[in-house]
Amino acid sequence: MQDETGVAVAHWECEALRDAIATVRAGVDGFAHRHGMARPTRQDVGAAVSEAVAVAMGPLLPAPGRVVVDAATDGACLSVRVAGGAEHESGEAIPMPLVVRLADRVEYGPRFTGAGTTILMEFAIPERDPAVRRRGERCGARTRPAARGHTRRGA
């Protein structure tokens, strides 16, 4: 889906079970591929998304909750927001070494509505699939500030 600003968006919501990780990873990979991200970069995104979904889901007991994932791209940057029911402790360090290493920008904090955790990741699209035209030049900070969480920017 593409909105009037030229930003393509996608949404996934599923029960927070182990197979949700593979479902969301495949969905985000397909979205990124359709919008020009080359395979090597998509592999990094997939690893980071898998880790973020697992962290956002938290423990599956006593009953699984929901995990909600939104992706957006303007052709220069892919943003992925993962929200789940895992509790977030204020001041907690980012417990996702792959996300921190692979994403160009990370925000980690409590959900904006209700209990739980939100992870926002941004990935530049440096290598483009030649079949997809270039729509932008760089990844910009167009996201909500992490007023209550942690932020890490890539070098």
Image (tube, helix red, strand yellow):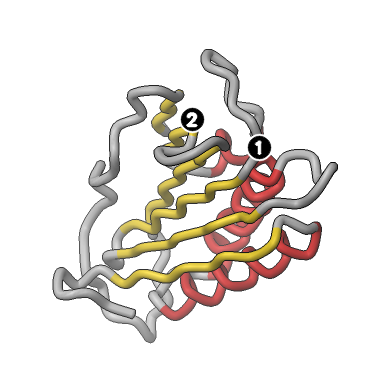
Check the image and report above or below for 89 versus 62.
above
Residue at the image position 54 percent from the left and 76 percent from the top = 30
* Nearer to the camera, 11 or 76: 11
- The one nearer the camera, 53 or 106, is 53
Residue 125 on image: x %, y %: 39, 59
Q: Which residue is mark 2?
A: 109
- Circle 2 packing at 10 Å, graded few (<14), some (14-19), many (20+), is many
How many badges with numbers are in the image? 2
Q: Position of residue 21 (x, y in %)?
A: 71, 59
Q: Which amino acid, mark 2?
A: Gly
Task: Determine the residue located farthest toward the top in the rendered image.
Answer: 91
Q: Which residue position holds label 1?
A: 86
The residue sitting at the bottom extreme is: 131
Identify the residue at image location x=62%, y=61%: 43
Instruction: Between label 1 and label 2, give the one nearer the viewer.
Output: 1
Q: Position of residue 25 (x, y in %)?
A: 64, 64
The residue depicted at 28 percent of the width and 50 percent of the height is 139
Camera-side residue of 5 and 102: 5
Q: Is residue 95 left or right of residue 104?
A: right
Q: Please give the name of the residue rendered at 49% of the width and 31% of the height, measured from the top-left corner.
A: 110
Secondary structure under tag 1 reads loop
Quick one: SS at disc 2?
A: strand
Q: Earlier in the sequence, mark 1 or mark 2?
A: 1
Tell me where residue 76 appears, x and y as whole percent. Answer: 29, 61
Q: Label 1 amino acid?
A: Ala
Pick out the residue farthest to the right.
61
